[in-house]
Amino acid sequence: MTDTSGRSPRQQRLSRVATTEAGMHTLPSVSPSGASDDHDQHGLTDGGRGQFATILLRLIGNRVALVGLCIFFGLIVASLLTAWFWTYSYTSITNTLNAPPSLSHPFGTTTIGADLFAQVMHGTLQDIEIALVVAVIATVFGALVGAVAGFYRGGVDAGLMRFVDLILVVPVLAVLIVLAHIVAKQASSWFWLAVIIGAVSWTYIARLVRADFLTLRERDFIEASRALGATNRRLILRHMLPNAMGPIIVNATITVALSIVLESTLSYIGLGIQAPNVSLGLLVNQGQDSATTEWWLFVFPVGFLVILTLSIFFIGDGLREAFDPKKSRVRA
Amino acid sequence: MLGYILRRLVVSIGVLFLATVLVFVLVVESGDPLALLKANPHIKHATIVAREKLLNLDHPLWDRYWIWFSHAVRGNFGKTVAGESVGPQLTSHLLVTLRMVILATLISIVLAIAVGVYAALHQGKIADHAATITNFIFIAAPVFVVGLLLKEFVAIPLNQHLNRIVFYTSGEQSPTLTGSFLSRLPDYAAHTALPTITLILVSYSSWAIYQRASILETLDSDHVRLARSKGISPRRVLIRHVLRNALIPVTTVIALDFAAVLGGALITELVFGWQGLGIWFLNGVTFLDVNVTLAYLLITATFVILFNLVADVIYAYLDPRIRYD
Amino acid sequence: MDDASLVVEQLVVDFAAGEGPVHAVRGISFSLAPREVLGIVGESGSGKSVTALAAMGLLPKNAKVSGSITYAGQELLGLREKDLAKVRGVGIAMIFQDPMTSLNPVYTVGWQIAEAVRAHQDVTKHAALARAVALLETVGIPNAAERVGNYPHEFSGGMRQRVVIAIAMANDPAVILADEPTTALDVTVQAQVLSSLRTALEETHASLLLITHDLGVIAGLADRVLVMYAGRPVEIGTVEQIFYEPAMPYTHGLLGSLPRLDGDGQDRLRQIPGSPPSRVGDGQGCPFAPRCPLRADVCNEREPELRPVRFRPHADDTPSGTEGSAPHVAACHFAEEVAAMPVASMFPDTSADHEGVAP
């Protein structure tokens, strides 16, 4: 076959091995531009779009994920706008106590006169902030541990996996409670809360990446890259991690959602975000006894908490479908 | 296979005790459990000294750990910060929690499999969408939200409507309950219903989603295609070749998740005011009671390990490929 | 064809996919006579597997099938799963491509064969198991009585495929569909599996639809050959007609790319340049035209129909093909000229490292 890129036949063939082996999960940085084989192993094409675009389009085409995206980003925008422009801040105290929703207080006021709308919005923002930090910590740490364990195998793998077991043998919540209690004394900033939640959330990603690496390790394109002189670090970072990126991204999204659940549970117990700061879990705790009397104190925090978490789960599910669609594979 | 299970057991126990060391250090280093006592001007100095001796607070860290360890392996978990014996408290609280956890876990497993299979077989239809959406909602909603919602918007209105208490929302039994076990049963049931339902709802949902995905994947597999090509009845294909194989990955997921069930039980107990392990543990942590904290850790970890063992055996029965590891 | 076991008429299979329907099969017709071996040859994506799966009713849910497939006079397309189950296994049996995933990993091999037996024969479990042992022996598994209690993961790929053949044979079907039975196996193992396949045919007196892209396998087993390209048959004939007088350039190309023991060893293998066309969207003209050295304007305008090749045989006694069930047909505007050309002369020699090889 003719090839106009000017490389030697050996290089052409090697690059074709790499792209056909790497398959669907390859992001553009790995495959040489333009040389990708348009046909999958069953001889069907997909029109030749780039990987990123394909995944993004699939995500947006998924109605449920689209709803999730709109809600999630809508919440972020709304809470930011509230923080900048709303009449009341989440700490302001007014003289109207326990007032039901009205025009000036859309979500009503609390027992001490705080504007619930501002508090719910701030709580949402706070929860999202914490969750994103947790996701970054958990994903980076988990992916690294998993990558090292899966790549080097043997003793390193066994040791690291025992470390994982250490964390998992007891309910995560119990560990968190112990840690939170200790942390609550040292510092009251939400950052440390995010750190400890991250410290218990990385295990699933680690296991996932490890499993992926164990199989990726055996693939031909790794051997080929090694033959071309790639160092271990380059292999892990430039060749294997991009291939595992799909499940990592999906899992990171789910971690965001789960960390909101964990943090709000901690705050509900009283070991998470403390007053005067505000989080949705704390608000639920404060409103739980008024559910039937001052219903707004309970319904709004609960509603926003559930909607926030749901939207992220929808996005995560949509991402999972986008990376690995089950329906569009057709065999000849 | 026996060797495989024994090895896992040994490693788990080793990991467990490593965890106890870690927690011990964390809890002990974070403060003085008798601080409150000391701050109270009415307590005599002698009492404080006696309590310190009781709790071995005069020993260095590693000695204290060794004391705890050597007693723990013989079943003696030491004394609480208040000077009482940990063991009996542990047992009574455990029995309360077990009521909820065992029932909830069993029902959750059955429900998860049933819903997962049903949704998969009716993929794309309304039943599937409904099931998936409810699953998602129960995964997204934290345990305490589900519990509170059930308490405030199901139990209380229902009780008011029927003008009698069908669902108790507080405590695990009526305070003055007496009589034979059988006569106490309805009271237990009325108290246990809501918390158990709460725990079931949050546990079954993620397993059901997984089961559904597992069935869908199996339906597409090569071996199911061959089974169909043999001309056996569609129902037999479904039960013997689809269901049987699709149960295997779910076993792992459920086993891994059992610790989370225990965590959920903790919160549920809080919401419904049960005097179970959860609240006992929380108080222990709040008062820096290292013996209570470790006892809780040990007992929950033991249950998780036991549960995983059972799951391993079931897994080996379901999947012959791992039997000869 | 009154005595034909399986008759396929104008089968069309489309798959609903994102960018529009994928035309996997665009109208194939053939009949399979009793005890005949018909080989279906083609590249990946030519639609050969889909044809077999359509006959068994095993296509995925997004497949739209039209046309007719009859077995023993009964129309198979559109039958419900319950009724299809009565035909599968005992009327038409299938052997699949990947032996590593075809068998259920949680049941023993004996159990799976016995299950096939008991689906159509009213026998005890004990008797079914005995038949399983006998079948394993027939396909060449050593120590059959012991191995009948083993699980699939305890067998090698070639042996697993032989178990699959045993399952297909279990009820003496009239038709066996073999979908690339040797593709996933090493060449050395292929011979064993093919030998088991031959034994299966002798024991069951079945006719065989052999789907493969390997012409060597065809040469060894087939009576007639159907060549598929881009979802349609482009040439049908006896195995001698196809191998010695190919009347369609694609067949030429396939044969030319085969290493031959009867060649003089100095010839280069000749490739067909280009790739098969996309199965999405409707094209015009002959789908092979872009790759064909003989293409003319008429090729881009009209897609050639399958028509009989009027070709007088050579003087040297290459058999011209028996006047049997069907004549030699090909879908090419220039079929007669193509048939007259020596095989493997049509395509240019385009190996990449042509210069690098010492003269």
Image (cartoon, coloured by chain):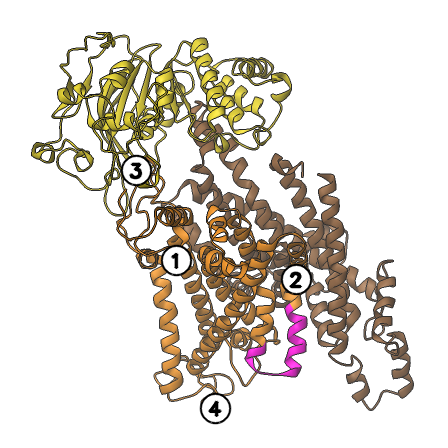
Chain colours: A orange, B brown, C yellow
Q: Residue, x 43% and y 27% (percent of image)?
A: B228
Mark 3 falls on what kind of element? loop
Q: Give the mark, 2 or 1, whose residue is nearer the N terminus.
A: 1
Which region shows up in magenta?
Answer: A176-192
Q: Residue A27's mark?
A: 1
Mark 2 falls on what kind of element? helix
Q: Nearer the viewer, mark 3 or mark 4?
A: 3
Q: To which residue does mark 2 refer? A: A167
Q: Look at the numbered discs 2 and 1 and tell me whether their residues touch, using CB distance below 8 Å.
A: no
Q: Residue A93's mark?
A: 4
Residue at the front extreme, as displayed: C359
- From mark 3 to mark 1, how far is it between C-alphas? 32 Å
Q: Residue C270's mark?
A: none
Which residue type does callout 3 highlight?
Ser
Q: Look at the numbered discs 4 and 1 and tell me whether their residues touch, using CB distance below 8 Å.
A: no
> For this view, does A280 lie left or right of residue B294?
left
Residue A247: x %, y % from top left = 47, 56
Mark 4 falls on what kind of element? loop
Which residue type does callout 4 highlight?
Ile
Q: Nearer the viewer, mark 2 or mark 3?
A: 3
Q: Give the mark, 4 or 1, whose residue is nearer the N terminus.
A: 1
